[in-house]
Amino acid sequence: MTRFSAFSLFAKALGGHQDWPEQWPDAAPKPAYDAIIVGGGGHGLGAAYYLAKKYGITNVAVLEKGWIGGGNTGRNTTIIRSNYLYDESAHLYDHAVKLWDGLSQELNYNVMYSKRGVMMLAHNVHDVQSLQRHINANRLNGVDNEWLTPEQAKAYCPPLNISPDARHPVLGAALQRRGGTARHDSVAWGYARAAAALGVDIIQNCAVTGIRSGADGAVEGVETTRGYIASKRVGVSAAGNTSVVMQMAGLDFPLESYPLQALVSEPIKPTFPCVVMSNTVHAYMSQSDKGELVIGAGTDQYVSYSQRGALHIVEHTLAAICEIFPIYRRMRMLRTWGGIVDVTPDRSPILGKTPVKGLYVNCGWGTGGFKATPGAGDLLAYTMAKDEPHPINAPFNLDRFRNGRLIDEAAAAAVAH
Amino acid sequence: MILIHCPYCDEKRPEIEFANAGQAHVARPLDPSSQSDEEWEAYLFIRANPRGRHHERWRHVHGCGRFFNAVRDTVTDKFETTYKAGEPRR
């Protein structure tokens, strides 16, 4: 693997950027592995990387039915934050935020993590009380979050309309300064490249069609479109398709899959310095390094695997954006797309063991999985290597839907996760 | 936006007139106190979430206000049929 440095980039630039070698080999499946990860998104690639890096399990395959990072990893709005209400969630998401720090150096790949701050707006008395409760809970958990007056919010994000006459008046905001954005494709590519360098096989166009178990019920391997692959450890990190994969092992999951849409505008000069979210009117926005405004819309109301959503969902979000940021009213939107998100009843992920021995799962991240990419990968790797969950992901087990110990972020974090 | 046929109004109307009400034919237990934890989990939380033919409930909130059932393909989002609540599963 070529090690990237300022010098190597400069040398390639002088040569007209010719002869860049491939970043990682397009592997063909071997008959057997020590561990298999189903799903080649950021979470799955991260798990493969940490299995190899931290736990010395390098004979690992990542099976991706399409292409690397072509699912939700390439379809999200790249927002990173950890200002979740409950202790379990704060620890889980802050574990990921801590890993985002230094990830570019660790992977030797620029993931463009930008701590530009995530600001959540309060439009009414309920929002003010709820966000201030979040701030207090976050601080008790060592997660930074602070209250801003409307004027401070305007100073932090100049395009914001704080006029008292506004359709959605701004009564204040909660700001997590460590929050921000990262380049989503780079995250997938960086993990893939670093994992492959440690010996992980990254296998594309390889859909899992069955999960084979032995007489004792333990996993023995997976059937795929490219043949049978044996492994006693299988981790499923398949986002919206998790229910489908788990049914191959005879497990019914507490998940429903919905389309979630996002859109970008035409590119403009830098005007929007942070991430702004408004849960009440359901809009959130940031500006990419390319200059596009990146806008997240809501989920459709029905279960679907279609990877596209309805236009009225987008219109609803844009109506709110135009009211909160009137300077963008004449912007044109360039592209919209949808990803399929797997939503749990309590809106918290499921990360741990399953009733089938040797089968592990990382799913249920719903509308907010990108921010957790390094943390989810790390914790899935730990769980697979030790055959027991890490204390951070232990509360996010599958049993909570039976014993009632839900982590109910559904109400706590409102719509936008 | 998808168009949905309401079996009560007997009209095809745009989706924004309707509210999706989740998986169809999930029957509430007749004797709740006799249910085990596993049975409660299955009733409250476990969902079919199929990739393909899906039975779901809709409510025509901005029309007749009534619940009905539908069969829709979750890959194409095309409706196969809609039928009145209480009619057998199709």
Image (tube, grey):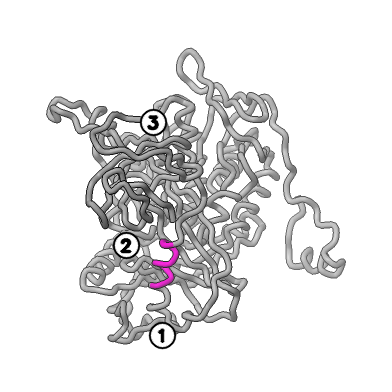
Q: Nearer the viewer, residue A93 or A250?
A: A250
What secondary structure predominates along the stretch shown in magenta?
Answer: helix
Q: Are marks 2 and 3 in contact (CB under 8 Å)?
A: no
Tag 3, which secondary structure? loop
Q: Which residue is mark 3?
A: A252
- Residue density around tag 2, few if under 14, some if 14–19, many if 20 or more, within 10 Å: many
Mark 2 to mark 3 CA distance (whole Å): 34 Å
Question: Residue A125, image x and y in percent?
Answer: 21, 73
Asked if residue A96 shows in the view, the reply is no
Judge from the rendering whether residue B72 lies leftward or rightward of residue A223; answer left or right: left
Question: Residue B67, image x and y in percent?
Answer: 25, 44
Mark 1 to mark 2 CA distance (whole Å): 23 Å
Q: Does the magenta segment cover residue A45?
A: no
Instruction: Tell me the kind of residue under disc 1.
Output: Ala
- Residue density around tag 1, few if under 14, some if 14–19, many if 20 or more, within 10 Å: few
Tag 1, which secondary structure? helix
Say which label, 2 or 3, has the lower sequence index: 2
Instruction: Magenta stretch: give its range.
Output: A312-319
Q: Which residue is mark 1?
A: A155
Q: Chain of mark 1?
A: A
Instruction: Tell me the kind of residue under disc 3.
Output: Asp
